[in-house]
Amino acid sequence: MNPATAGGIGEVPLASPATIVRVPQHLRALEQANRVRLARAELKRQVAEGERTVAEIVRECPWEAESMQIADLLQSQHRWGHTRCRRLLTGISIPETKTIGSMTDRQRHVLAARLEGQHAEDPFAALACV
């Protein structure tokens, strides 16, 4: 009697509940990219509708905004276009292509203060004149 065919020791069921199906890497990457796109769209919608502010998002830096360019987030606000965005960011020496996750604490503080209508004191301003 062959144990592999008789249902005895050594038999491997064709479909076991513990079977792990590996999804190809490119499909996992597409799924992740879709999750990020949907989350960013929701974040931009919240900003456009006034549910959240850009200053709040810059300070918190949620996962969906980490790799997002600051210009994209600023332009999701009502009446914010390329020119207004560029003027603000040029005034505080932040490139438009800077990602939110790569901003320093100082840059976050200065940008959030400007967006809230305050003029944040730059702790390093005195050093720039030296």
Image (spheres, rainbow, N blue to C red):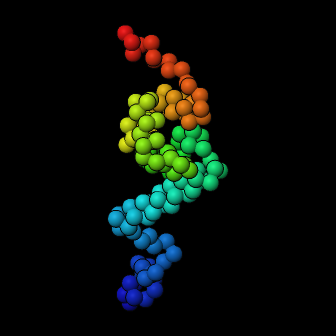
Q: Residue furthest right?
A: 51
Q: Quadrant of residue 14?
A: bottom left
Which residue appears at 35% of the width and 67% of the height? 24
> Where, quadrant-wise, is the N terminus in this rendering?
bottom left
Quarter of the figure with residue 104: top left
Residue 105 appears in the rendering: no
Is residue 120 visible to us here? yes
**Which of 46/64 is in front?**
46
How many dots with numbers? 0
- Look at 62% across and 54% down and name the residue there: 49
Q: Residue at x 58, y 53 (%)?
A: 48
**Residue 89 pos. (x, y %):** 43, 35
Q: Is residue 113 above or below residue 62?
A: above
> Could you tell me residue 17's position as x and y percent?
51, 75
Name the foreground residue: 23 vs 1.
Answer: 23
Image point (59%, 40%), residue name: 56
- Residue 29 location, quadrant: bottom left
Query: Residue 6, position in %: x, y?
Result: 43, 89
Viewport quadrant of the C terminus: top left
